[in-house]
Amino acid sequence: MAYFTVGLITMMALILLLLPIINQYLSCPEIRSCDANDRFSCSNNPPQNCSFQLVETIPENLTYPSGSIESMSTFDAWMFLLKNAKKSVDLISFYWLMMDRPETNSSLDIQGKTVFNELLNVIKRGVKLRIIVNKPNTTNPDLLALSQAGAEVLNLEAEKLLKSGVLHTKLWLVDGQMLYLGSANMDWRSLTQVKELGILIKSCDLLLSDASKLVDLYNYVASRNEVPRHWPCKFNTRYNADNPMQLNVQDQATSVFLSSSPPFFCPSGRTSDINAILNVIHSAKQFVHISVMDYMPYTEFAKPHLFWPVIDDALRRVAVEKKIEVKILTSLWKHTKPDMLQYMKSLASLNGLSFTKPETSLQAKLFCVPVVMPYQQTIPYARVNHNKYMVTDQTAYIGTSNWSGDYFINTAGVAIIIGEPTPSGEDHHHHQAIFERDWYSNYSIGVWNVDVNNFTISCNSA
Ligand SMILES: *[C@@H]1O[C@H](CO)[C@@H](O)[C@H](O)[C@H]1NC(C)=O
Ligand SMILES: *[C@@H]1O[C@H](CO)[C@@H](O)[C@H](O)[C@H]1NC(C)=O
Ligand SMILES: *[C@@H]1O[C@H](CO)[C@@H](O)[C@H](O)[C@H]1NC(C)=O
Ligand SMILES: *[C@@H]1O[C@H](CO)[C@@H](O)[C@H](O)[C@H]1NC(C)=O
Ligand SMILES: *[C@@H]1O[C@H](CO)[C@@H](O)[C@H](O)[C@H]1NC(C)=O
Ligand SMILES: *[C@@H]1O[C@H](CO)[C@@H](O)[C@H](O)[C@H]1NC(C)=O
């Protein structure tokens, strides 16, 4: 009996002692407005003047009339980031191909080689280079060389962690102070042969500390090789579609949040990428302009293919009910799936519905990156518009995902959503102008002018 009592008391004491620890796993403390991660929002200093800059790769031989809007190049943005790195460079990447292979003497990949050499320099300067990559890393020459030079390379085992999905994120974080997020892969072709759009962000501590939570999340998943059932509290965020952070961007009040895909990569508070997209579409008051490589209202990779009209429904709804002008620009190249053309024609067939005035406006076009030089014909998976963004009269969305079901169900991606109370900021104008430059360019073809059964010909004649 005495033993039993002593045993019971010891057990009770143990439980009492462990309670706080157990509790920590059951619930996360409320994120207070002045916690360590958000120290910047609570200081009395004047708000930071964040710098946002859209960056693009315009493939060689894709030319616009003089006077067209221009952006900083992806190459310049990446070199800027690497040259200015002091402590750490984190690269979340899909795959690596910074040099043309097999080893040729071509100068085609000169920009890729330059970035690669700068990465080696970064390591030599004592900066910590950490890479998280989707594809198996053992046979990749880029990653082998970087890892031998001292980079930490972590594999994210997508097959196990994402079922049939992949790590499709393209996110750079430098010194926890600067960021690149966009469509460009770690690929020499992303610098000269593929059309890309992304954003370079500087001096914006509140946003960067939220972005570093995403980077830490990938690191956590990759190094443990598992997706936790409950995310540790440190990954939670206060900033999302309902509560965007209020920033000062180039002297403009701007509300911003970061979204993440798939939903099981969203700790508490993080808006999923698909909800972010729906939110942007539904909050438009006048127009929704979309430029994505692929637009498919079904699951492309998962078998069986499931009908997935989540974005498609939202676009039809705002066009029909709210008379929002919808324009969607996708990519036409040799790998375009004929299905996509049919789905786009289906969307565009609602253009001009006059059941209620004013008529609905829902237009679809395809963008062709021209093949001018004979060698361009032979570069695999190049000469394509790889953009993944949306710009409305209220908001800009810059992401890394193709717009098909898979990317929002089991593929890892991130996006930034930038809203302005008075959409008059320079960046917003710049972004709208980029869309219009492409939409009205000779490289865009109305979807009705494309023959589903014979479409590559349309591209070459553009
Ligand atoms: C295409 O680009 C290449 C490489 O920059 C250049 O040498 C060539 O003159 C360009 N051709 C045309 C027709 O613009
Ligand atoms: C590349 O250039 C070197 C030296 O000029 C030459 O020996 C080699 O054969 C060239 N390789 C190719 C694939 O053209
Ligand atoms: C590949 O990844 C593993 C763990 O993810 C890491 O330990 C190893 O160093 C990496 N190898 C290379 C060549 O980068
Ligand atoms: C904020 O940044 C923009 C662009 O970098 C610059 O033009 C402006 O002068 C800055 N404003 C202040 C108050 O420093
Ligand atoms: C399209 O091509 C025609 C004929 O070459 C040219 O006159 C026109 O300026 C071009 N338009 C644009 C937007 O590039
Ligand atoms: C595709 O279009 C080209 C040029 O108009 C034509 O010569 C060819 O026969 C067409 N092919 C098919 C399968 O319709």
Image: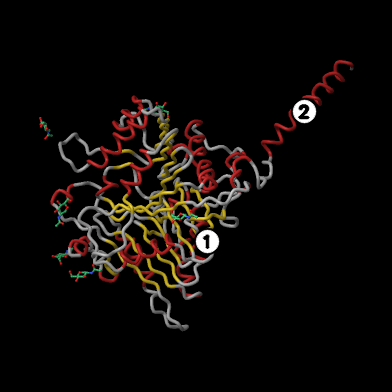
**Left or right relative to 349: residue 47:** right
Up the image or down, 203 lies above or below 311; here it is: above
Q: Where, quadrant-wise, is the N terminus in this rendering?
A: top right
Q: Which residue is drawn at 71% across and 36% down?
A: 23
Q: Can residue 343 be seen in this view?
A: no
- Earlier in the chain: of badge 2 and badge 1, it is 2
The residue that mark 2 highlights is 15
Q: Is mark 1 on a helix, strand or loop?
A: helix
Q: In this view, does 356 lie above or below 226?
A: below
Left or right: 274 in relation to 430: right
Q: Badge 1: few (under 14), some or many (20 or more) residues near its Cα, within 10 Å?
A: some
User: Could you tell me which secondary element the residue under label 2 belongs to?
Assistant: helix
Cβ atoms under marks 2 and 1 closer than 8 Å: no
Image quarter where the C terminus lies is bottom left
Q: Distance between the residues labelled 2 and 1?
A: 45 Å
* Residue drawn at 50 percent across, 45 percent down: 208
* Residue type (three-letter) at the residue carrying disc 1: Asn
Report whether residue 265 is seen.
yes
x, y percentage for residue 4?
85, 19
Q: Of residues 127 and 314, which is closer to you in this image? A: 127
Q: Can you give x and y, in whole percent of width and height, for residue 155 in the image?
A: 41, 33
Q: Residue at x 42, y 30 (%)?
A: 128
The quarter of the rendering in which ligand 6 is drawn is bottom left
Please tell me in which quadrant of the rendered image residue 354 appears.
bottom left
Indicate which disc residue 279 carries. 1
Residue most extreme to the top = 3
| Residue 316 in which image quadrant | bottom left
Residue 102 x, y percent position in the rendering: 19, 35
Tag 2: residue type?
Ile
Q: Residues within 10 Å of mark 2 (few under 14, many from 20)?
A: few
With 149 as the anchor, is 42 left or right in this view? right
